Image (tube, rainbow, N blue to C red):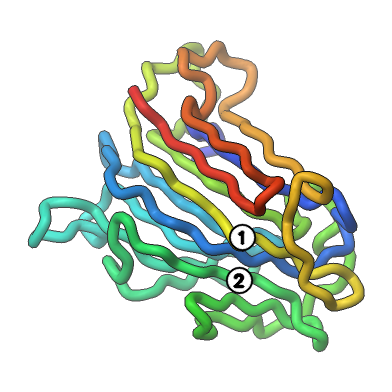
């Protein structure tokens, strides 16, 4: 399996109860336009927790292609210890607003909800040890990738994936006491990241359009070339 992804990310992590929170939810406004340059390139936006990554995505692949518009369009996905599971292809379109929620239920099962409708509930239960790291705690991620390699490349090509403003709002996390808490700049942080590490990354290194309004529970990124 390819281990070295040429990718860029934005991540929102609650700092309050970082490793004890049991859910995250947000509304995402999908970009109104995008350019996926080559096979396998994608944009996804999702909640993560306990090894699950659940949200909406679009990819340069035949299943995502909409012949009516000549564009690639979006669907929901649920990846993780019991996935992957996929929703109907091209269910969501550029510019749509989609609400996503990933939560550990009181009985320990993990559930994914889109626009108020349950899409997936785990067959197994997941205890506190399953969400006690930065990569497994309740959080929100925006990710893009253009290609990947089995071995670390010696150099990287110029980045060629772009998209207009992608905004997340109405962000909330569920604390250990079971209450949903509004995200703000006092209880969460947002960071940019990229891979692969250990290789010089051509400019722009990270998303080059960032609007950080965590004080109002909003965060947005875009990518221009």
Where does the image place residue 119, in percent across and percent down from the top left?
A: 51, 81
Task: Specify whether 96 is left or right of 123.
Answer: left
The disc label shown at residue 164, or none? none
User: What residue is rendered at 55% in x and 36% in y?
Assistant: 211
Where does the image place residue 79, in percent across and percent down from the top left?
A: 55, 64
Spatial CA span between label 2 and label 1 = 7 Å
What residue is pinned by disc 2? 101
Where does the image place residue 193, in percent across and percent down from the top left?
A: 62, 31
Look at the image and tell me whether residue 215 can be seen. yes
What residue is pinned by disc 1? 47
Label 2 with label 1: CB-CB less than 8 Å: yes
Local packing at callout 1 (Cα closer than 10 Å; few below 14, some 14-19, many 20+) is: many
164 or 120: nearer the eye? 164
Q: Secondary structure at mark 1?
A: strand
Local packing at callout 2 (Cα closer than 10 Å; few below 14, some 14-19, many 20+) is: many
Q: Secondary structure at mark 2?
A: strand
Find residue 20 and report its image quarter.
bottom right
Q: Residue extending furthest front?
A: 216
Task: Specify whether 107 is left or right of 151.
Answer: right
């Amino acid at each position: 399996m390819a281990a070295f992804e040429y990718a860029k990310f934005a991540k929102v992590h609650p700092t309050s109860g970082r490793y004890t929170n049991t859910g995250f939810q947000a509304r995402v406004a999908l970009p109104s336009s995008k350019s996926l340059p080559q096979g396998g390139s994608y944009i996804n936006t999702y909640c993560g927790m306990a090894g699950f990554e659940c949200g909406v995505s679009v990819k340069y692949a035949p299943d995502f292609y909409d012949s009516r518009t000549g564009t690639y369009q979006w669907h929901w996905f649920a990846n993780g210890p019991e996935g992957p599971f996929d929703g109907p292809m091209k269910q969501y379109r550029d510019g749509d607003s989609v609400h996503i929620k990933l939560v550990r239920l009181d009985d320990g099962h993990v559930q994914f909800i889109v626009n108020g409708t349950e899409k997936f509930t785990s067959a197994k239960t997941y205890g506190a040890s399953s969400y006690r790291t930065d990569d497994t705690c309740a959080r929100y991620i925006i990710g893009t990738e253009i290609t990947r390699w089995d071995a670390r490349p010696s150099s990287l090509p110029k980045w060629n994936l772009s998209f207009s403003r992608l905004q997340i709002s109405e962000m909330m996390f569920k604390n250990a006491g079971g209450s949903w808490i509004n995200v703000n700049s006092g209880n969460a942080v947002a960071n940019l990241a990229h891979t692969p590490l250990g290789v010089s990354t051509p400019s722009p290194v990270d998303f080059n359009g960032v609007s950080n309004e965590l004080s109002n529970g909003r965060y947005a990124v875009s990518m221009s070339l």
